[in-house]
Image (cartoon, rainbow, N blue to C red):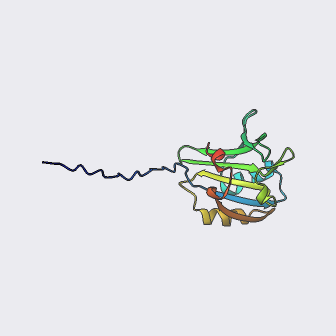
Amino acid sequence: MRRFVSMIRLKKMKLEIDDEIEFPILGISTALGDYRLAWELNSKLNLKFQRSQECKFFTIPDKSKKNIDYEYYSYVDDEEMSKFFLVKNKQKGSILFSDRERLDFFLILRDNFVWDEEDLLSDLRMIKGVIAVFAFSSTEFEFSEYLND
């Protein structure tokens, strides 16, 4: 008796896990300096932005693959589980996000479990010296993976 062994081709499926967490980024157009904008955010929104410590930067490669260090202000509240960063777009002769070069600052809401984004946009627009505020998603930025910490 002959047995026919059928060879069934198994279909291989590739499981891809996207571990990138999407978070809001607010683009701010203002004539205020970084220290002044941080002070305004602290006083008007009751936050506590602090300048990054010496030797602590966002290090991001530019288009020529040269690493550029960007200074920033940070606000971390463990109780409210909030982690925000304020980064000046133009620093040291380089532009952090060249496709949005008209924006002066980016407020990165890395962890945000308290603030409603629309309320925050409205509050930012009320600050004297802020010209405009725009909302973006981290997925819209080429270098958003460097902003995770």
Give 147 or 123, whichever is nearer the viewer.
147
Image location of residue 86, percent across then percent down: 71, 50
Residue occupying the far front of the picture: 1
Rendered location of residue 34, percent (x, y): 80, 49
| Point 73% across, 39% down: residue | 57
Q: In the picture provided, is 41 more to the left or to the right than 76?
A: right
Q: Quadrant of residue 139?
A: bottom right
Q: Provide residue 103's location: percent of width, then percent of height.
A: 78, 59
Asked if residue 68 is positioned above or below residue 126 in the image, the reply reads above
| Residue 13 at least partly seen | yes
Task: Return the residue found at the far right.
Answer: 93
Determine whether, in the image, residue 39 is placed left or right of residue 93: left
Left/right of residue 10 with respect to residue 116 in the rendered view = left
> What residue is at 77 percent from the left and 59 percent from the top?
99
On screen, residue 148 above or below 141: above
Q: Residue furthest left?
A: 1
Out of 43 and 98, give the one closest to the viewer: 98
